Image (cartoon, rainbow, N blue to C red):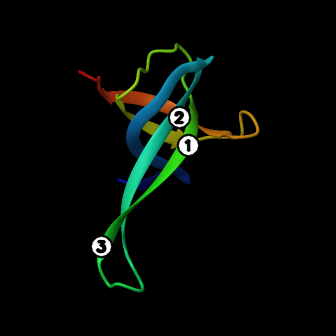
Amino acid sequence: METTRNSRLVRQGEVVSAGKMDKTVVVKVVSRVKSPIYKKVVQKSNTFKAHDENNECGMGDIVRIMETRPLSKDKHFRVIEIVEKAK
């Protein structure tokens, strides 16, 4: 799910790493693209480091992240909401 709002990209993905870095989570975003070679739809995944101000996210949570100014060398997104907590 990708939309632009005020030129800021919003994506939804699953938290794959939390608690190892202070106020930072790693979010895996899966997108579906058509393979130019095989002409089939395949899943492609990217990982993004996102800022989690209150350390609320846990492993397996589904979160929505928004593009922001660079917060560090690798961190350019921030968590705007937790869509679903992990079971």
Where, by quadrant of the figure, is residue 37 drawn?
bottom left
Determine whether, in the image, residue 25 is placed left or right of residue 56.
Answer: right
Quadrant location, the C terminus: top left
Q: Could you tell me the amino acid type at mark 2?
A: Val
Question: In the rendering, at what x and y percent does residue 40 appear?
Answer: 29, 79
- Please state which of residues 19 and 2 is positioned toward the viewer in this rendering: 19
Q: Is any part of residue 6 visible from this angle?
A: no
Q: Could you tell me the amino acid type at mark 1?
A: Phe
Q: CA distance from mark 1 to mark 3?
A: 22 Å
Labels 1 and 2: the sequence-earlier one: 2
Q: CA distance from mark 1 to mark 2?
A: 6 Å
Which residue matches tag 1? 48
Task: Tell me if label 2 and label 3 are in contact, CB under 8 Å.
Answer: no
Which residue matches tag 3? 41
Q: CA distance from mark 2 to mark 3?
A: 25 Å
- Judged from the image, the secondary structure of the residue bearing numbered disc 1 is strand
Q: Could you tell me the amino acid type at mark 3?
A: Val
Q: Is residue 87 above or below residue 10?
A: above
Q: Residue at x 51, y 41 (%)?
A: 66
Question: In the rendering, at what x and y percent does residue 36 appear?
Answer: 42, 84
Residue found at the far left of this picture: 87
Q: Residue at x 38, y 43 (%)?
A: 12
Where, by quadrant of the figure, is residue 39 drawn?
bottom left
Labels 2 and 3: the sequence-earlier one: 2
Crowding near the residue tagged with mark 2, few <14, some 14–19, many ≥20 C-alpha atoms within 10 Å: many
Question: In the rendering, at what x and y percent does residue 42 appear?
Answer: 33, 68
Q: Identify the mark at residue 26; answer none if there is no mark.
A: 2
Task: Tell me if label 1 and label 3 are in contact, CB under 8 Å.
Answer: no
Q: Residue at x 58, y 37 (%)?
A: 49
Task: Tell me if label 1 and label 2 are in contact, CB under 8 Å.
Answer: yes
Determine whether, in the image, residue 15 is placed left or right of residue 22.
Answer: left
